[in-house]
Structures are given as C-alpha cells and as structure tokens.
Amino acid sequence: MKREMSDIQTRILAFIEEYTRTHGRPPTNREIGAKVEISSTGHVDYHLTVLEKKGYIERERKKSRGIRLAHQEPAGLRVYGAIAAGQPIEIYADQQESPLDLSARHTHEYVLKVKGNSMIDDHINDGDCVLVLPDATISDGDIIVATHMTDGANGAATLKRIYRERDRIRLQPANSQMDPIYVPRHEWDTEWQVQGKVTAVYRQFS
Amino acid sequence: MKREMSDIQTRILAFIEEYTRTHGRPPTNREIGAKVEISSTGHVDYHLTVLEKKGYIERERKKSRGIRLAHQEPAGLRVYGAIAAGQPIEIYADQQESPLDLSARHTHEYVLKVKGNSMIDDHINDGDCVLVLPDATISDGDIIVATHMTDGANGAATLKRIYRERDRIRLQPANSQMDPIYVPRHEWDTEWQVQGKVTAVYRQFS
DNA sequence: TACACTGTAGAACGTGGGTTCTATGACATT
DNA sequence: AATGTCATAGAACCCACGTTCTACAGTGTA
C-alpha cells in the first residue's frame, strides 16, 4: 500500500517557517534538531539536504543559519491564485494556465487575489490580496476561504465570514446588498471545505 | 558650518535592513564590518550596542545573527511611526518617546500606522499600515502624507487625497462626514509639505 | 588640566554551528 | 540472501561568530 508520510521533514519545514517568522532569522541545525527531537546535527543536515534536493529550501553552504525557504518573494508573499468575494467562481491560478490545485493541502500561508466586492464592508476590495493561513483554528466571525466541490469540476472558491448555526453553516458576505450562503451541516466537510483563514490584507496602488 | 553626521551607525542600520531583506537573515558582525569597512569585530559590537541602546535594534545575545530591527512588521516592512487619517496629529514615533524626525529625508519606502478613520471610504482603516514612497511624482487624486509645520512644534501629519486647485491645495479626506482642508498656495511647500505618496496598504487581523 | 565620552584597532577566548565520517537498524527490491 | 535506500546516532573537526579586553586618539566639558 501507499505509505503516506506525515514526514519529519514536514515538521522541519514548518518549524523553519515558524522560527523564521517569529525570530526574524532562520534556525540553526541544532535548533531544528532540538525542536523535532533529533539528537544529531549530522542527522538534521541529512534532512536539510533532502529538503534542498526536493526544492523546498535553499541553502547557503557553510553560512550560519544559511537556510532560505524556496518560493519566497522578497516581499515575502506569493500569489497562488484568485478568490471570489462575490459569487463563488472557478478556482484558477494567476500566473499559470492550469487551475489551482487545492487538493494538495497547503501547509503554509499563501496569497490569493480577491475578485469581487462582497467583502467591501470589511474594506476588502476587488483586486486586494489576502493572506491565507491553512490549518488555523476557525472561530465564528473569521474571514475564511471556502471551497465548494461539485461533480468533476475543479470547484469554486469564495471569501466569506463564517458563522456556525444550529443545523447549518452561514457564509456571510460583508456587503449589505448580498445574501449569505447557507450550507447544511451534512454538506459541510464533504461538499464544502474551509481552505484557510484570512490573516492579512494587502492592497497596492498602481 | 556643522556637518551633520551621516553616521556610520546609519550605514550599519541600512546595511542590516538591506542584507536581511535580500538574504532572508540578519548579517553577522563580521559581515557588517566588511561592508562598512570596520576591521574589528569588537568595534562592530560596540556600534551595535549603541544602536541597541538607542532602540533601533534588538539583539539576542550569544546567538549568531542575533540582530532584529526594531519596529518591524511581520511582512518585513519597517514602521517609522504613526500618521493621522483624521485631524492632523502630532508626529510621533511608535516605540520611542522622541517625536519622529522627518527632517532627515527618507530615501526609501517606509511604513506608517494609520490612526483615525478619515480615509475609510478608500478602505483604509484605523490601525492599517500604509507604505509611503517619498520623492514620487504626485498626481491629483493621489493619497499622500502631508505635514504641517507650526512654530517650534514638531508639526502634524495627516493622510489625505491631494487636489491642486486654482489658488489653493485641497486635502480631501475619504469620509463623507469630514470636510477637506484647504491650504493657500503660498503656504504650500513652506508651512505644508508632502512627505510622500501612499503606494500600498497592509492590514493584519489579530 | 583632568575627566568623560565616543569612535577606532587588534587580539584573544570560548562557544556556536555546518560538515563529515562511521555505524546501525528498518524496509523494499532483486 | 544480498543489495540498496532511508532514517537515525554519536563523535570529531574546524571555521564562524559573539564577546571581552587593552590601547589610543579626538572632542567636549567641568
């Protein structure tokens, strides 16, 4: 059978990201080892070499803390695709022709460009970029990215505030002209899914 | 006359900022020394200690590359102070008592935190961060940071849209409840000054 | 004049930290 | 059973790097 690895390498990658964000610098091999309970620095080096070969990180050899997460913009943000803030729209990626593949779960924060005006009362405009954190704990009232999987299609994604009610989930737009979407509990987690929570908004003026 | 110090500490600070941005990690004392042509690592340490005492950086002692720029946003942008989006308020720096010194011209983009709601119709909230580009060409309708110098005081700063009219400048808030500020032409560039143009907005959810 | 403060230099010390090497066990493939 | 790959451990090596100390020169101040 297929062994699905929730690898130690995933944990290392997550730690590098978290440490870098919280400390403003990448961790050392020994700090990584301490976190993931690897006693040998050589062992950590081994995993880093693997991660480098797989393209997840870049390393500057012989430099202390010479680890850089790959695919990171100087600004720190990478735009993965677009997200509807109006009617759910087909998920699509920005710089590529291929539709956004959300089946491969994101483990890190990523950026989506907002289409539509349904979140306008929350001051999220058409064209803004939102920073999405997957695997975050969701509270009522959080702004989230929800996807609706239908038949063979790629599905649709939308940006809404989420409220859990008795027997349904309410996806509330921040636009007085628009009505909420109600999703029955039994469709939740099957047809509908939360892709992540919006942690920041970024807007650039031309 | 007295030559103002375009200090070596300023260069060190600028280098730390640039190196961190381009390399994804802070520089070592020796890397700093190489850049600013200081041959002694102890000497660099001395300047870092001073910078730390002045509040420009934070250090984690004994850790390699244990330098962090103070006043830094997660996105990697540097917050220089606050800016009023309502009535012009006293310019002040964020973490320090000393008022923000805008006389030393900024040469790069910097970040100000918005106080007030006067730009709410442009979807700039209280608490948002704006990215300010000095030395940009200003067009009518641009959102700009304007400062008003009065007597001995440090002056007040405000965030507004700018429109040049016949014999005056109109500083227009984006809030229907607020009135524009009109500045006579002859006061412009003397009492009033444009500090820069807003190029982006960044908002973080708690 | 003496003293304090800031800026500079050189060297030395001790630990931080990346790399390398050897050895070993768990699995999968041949 | 032999071989190969992946994951792990321990130790050693050696340069990287923060810190400390001494010394000295320029400047301002009591």
Image (cartoon, coloured by chain):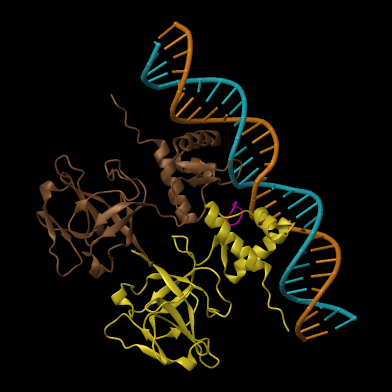
Chain colours: A brown, B yellow, C cyan, D orange
Instruction: Decide if residue C20 is on the left or right side of residue A68.
Output: right
Q: Quadrant location of the N terminus of chain B?
A: bottom right
Front residue of this view, candidates A34 and B66: B66
Q: Residue at x 33, y 78 (%)?
A: B119
Q: Residue B158 magenta-drawn?
A: no
Q: How many marks?
A: 0
Answer whether residue A137 is visible to the viewer in this image: no
Taking B44 as reference, is B105 above or below it? below
Q: Residue at x 32, y 51 (%)?
A: A94
Q: Quadrant of residue B101?
A: bottom right
Q: Quadrant of residue A28?
A: top right
Q: Main secondary structure of the magenta part?
A: loop
Please state the horizontal and vertical placement of residue A199, each as a whole percent of the image: 33, 59
Front residue of this view, candidates D23 and B116: B116
Instruction: Decide if residue B184 is on the left or right side of residue D13.
Output: left
Taking A206 as reference, is A111 above or below it? above
Front residue of this view, candidates B48 and A94: A94
Q: Which residues are magenta?
A: B59-66
Please state the horizontal and vertical placement of residue A16, each as a whole percent of the image: 46, 46
Q: Residue at x 51, y 91 (%)?
A: B150
Please state the horizontal and vertical placement of residue B8, each as a whole percent of the image: 68, 67
